[in-house]
Amino acid sequence: MDTQARGRDNPYGFEAGAVNSAADGTTYTLTMVNQSAEPWIFYVYQTFPEQTSDIFSLAWLASPYMIVPKAQITFKWTINYTFLWGQTGVLQPGVPFVAGMSIDADPSVGDTTEFSVKPGPNLTPAQPGGGLGTLTIYDQSDVPNSQFSVGIGMGDAGTFATQAGANLKHVFTPTPSYWVAAGVDQKVGTVLDIQTVTQTAPVVYPDNVYSLTATLQDDNTWSVKP
């Protein structure tokens, strides 16, 4: 996939309908509609079933502008995974995670990669070697503490990140669980504290359903329907 397709020139990440996949697969569609009284940034994030405190969810998809009342935005994606690194400093909620590199990853074969900062920050080509259904990143001994973060993404936008450091091992078990939310300043890559996210709701795709509409209603609660 070329650089333009990856959206790297877009400071907001991927706009509506522009999350591209390096592999063929089912396209999922999510339309977010604002029926509330206020304008909002609409965004989507993912969670793990038993997410540990050292793994942060990122704002994965986000509207590049406020969605005003009666307006809407549509996101599309396919399920394909990537390994990522970013120079974040100390990883904490509110910090932007901007990927410095993205490589394709396949949990079905237990892909692994190594993160090093010599000669410059880099990820080695992914290769099988981890547990099936997992993605594993091995930080090398030259990785300084509290300067970089590593993680995984979907559609080349980051979904989860964790602090990198010398000789650390990071194992991710991707099981997509989608959530919608409304905020005021989130952008693609914003590090979230999922315990404090408000105006949020889960998005579950039933079997053989690939398009949903999430409506923020006039009482600021979400209704999610096919």
Image (cartoon, rainbow, N blue to C red):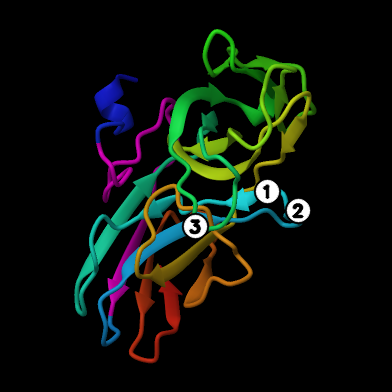
Residue 69 occupies quadrant: bottom left
Which residue position holds label 3? 94
Q: Residue at x 44, y 58 (%)?
A: 44
Residue 52's mark? 2
Give percent across and percent down for residue 7.
Answer: 29, 33
Q: Which image quadrant is residue 211 in?
A: bottom left
Disc 2 versus disc 3: nearer the observer: 3
- In front: 40, or 89? 89
Which amino acid does the dot numbered 2 rest on?
Thr
Real-space Cα separation, disc 1 to disc 3, in angstroms:
14 Å
Q: Residue furthest top?
A: 119
Say what secondary structure mark 1 lies in. Answer: loop
Label 3 crowd (10 A; few <14 / some 14-19 / many >=20)? some
Residue 19, magenta (yes or no): yes
The amino acid type, in three-letter code, at marker 1 is Ile
Give the labeled residue for mark 1.
55
Q: Which residues are magenta?
A: 10-34
